[in-house]
Amino acid sequence: MKIAAIGDNCVDVYPKLDRYYCTGNSVDFAVHMKRLGAEVSLISTTGNDEYGRQMIAELNEEEIDITHLKVGEGETAISYMDLVDRERTYGDYIEGVMENVEFSKEDIEFAASHDLIHTAFWGNAHMHLPELKKKGAKICFDYATEVEDPLVEETVPYVDYAFFSFEDCNLKVKDFLKKIVEKGSLVAVATFGEGGSMAYDGKEYYQCGICPAAVVNTVGAGDSYMAGFMYGIMSGKEMPECQKLGAKIAAKVVGFFEPWEKGSEQDGN
C-alpha cells in the first residue's frame, strides 16, 4: 500500500502554554498511515528555519519518504493556538513558505505513482486533481467545515473519498452526503466530534460512534480518523470496520497534547 500526502505542513504554537509541535493535515495523515503499516510519501514545502529542520527530523524519525519535501527560503507556516476546555482554538495563521507553494510536474507524476493520494482544503493542490484522477490514483480530500465553499463543487467530481466536519448529524447532513456521491465521489463521510461519524456509499448510510477517551487535546482527531478510515478502505475492509478503525485511532490521539504521540507503537496496536 503506497500512500502520498500532498499539501500543507506547519507548526502549531501555543503562546500561553509555551509549547509547539509539528503538524499539518498532510503531515498528520502521513504519520498515522505510516504507523498503520503503509508506505508513505509527503509532498510539501517547509521552511529553512528551526521549525523546518525539526519537521524534517521528525518525518525522518517516522520513516516517511520526504524526497519530495522541498525546503523553501523563509519561515515554516505557523498556526497560533490556544486550548480552551481541552478544545483547540485557532488564532492567527502565518503562511510562511506555504503562501507561494507550487507543485511541479514531477511532484504530480510522483504522487500519481501511489495507490492513494490525500490532500485537503488548505493544501494548495486542488488544481491538480483532474490530472491526478486521469492518471488513475484514488483520491481522498478533507474539506473540513468548508461545506459551502465553491471549491467543493469544483473538486468533488475528482475526489473518490470526501470528508466533511459538522456539529451534529441531521437530515440535512444525509442529503448533503447523498449529493456529494451523486456528483462523483465513491464515498462521502461526515464526522461530528463526540457524535461519531456517518458514511454514505451511494447505497447505504453507515453510522458509527466514538471510542471512549480521556481527552487532553482534540487536535489531530479528524486527521487520524481519516487515516484509519482510509487504511481500512485500502485494506479492503467493510465500511463499518473502516469507521471503527478511524474512531479507535482518533480516541488514542485525543489522549495526548500533540497530534501524534512521539515514539509510540503503531496505531493499529
Image (tube, rainbow, N blue to C red):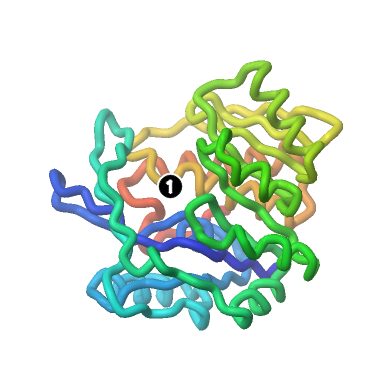
Which of the 4 quarters of the picture holds residue 130? bottom right
Q: Quadrant of the N terminus?
A: bottom right
Q: Which residue lies at the image location 57% right of the left edge and 53% below the top edge?
A: 268
Q: Callout 1: helix, strand or loop? A: loop
Residue 266 visible within the image? no
| Residue 11 higher or lower than 63, as above or below | above
- Amino acid type, label 1: Gly
Residue 237 rendering spot, x and y as whole percentages: 77, 48
Q: Which residue lies at the image location 59% right of the left edge and 78% below the top edge?
A: 107
Residue 93 rendering spot, x and y as whole percentages: 30, 51
In the picture, measured across the screen, residue 30 lies left or right of residue 118, that is left
Out of 136 and 193, give the one closest to the viewer: 136
| Residue 183 higher or lower than 59, as above or below | above
Q: Residue furthest top?
A: 171
Mark 1, residue position:
220
Q: Which residue lies at the image location 31% right of the left edge and 65% below the top edge?
A: 96
Residue 201 visible within the image? yes
Q: Which residue lies at the image location 31% right of the left edge and 79% below the top edge?
A: 73
In the picture, measured across the screen, residue 215 lies left or right of residue 83, that is right
Quick one: label 1, few (<14), some, or many (20+) residues within 10 Å? many
In the picture, measured across the screen, residue 18 lies left or right of residue 88, that is left
Residue 222 rendering spot, x and y as whole percentages: 50, 43
For the image, the number of numbered tags is: 1
Q: Residue furthest right?
A: 203
Out of 43 and 211, give the one closest to the viewer: 43
Residue 192 rendering spot, x and y as whole percentages: 53, 28
Which of the 4 quarters of the picture holds residue 75? bottom left
| Residue 228 higher or lower than 34, as above or below | above
Out of 72 and 84, give the one closest to the viewer: 72
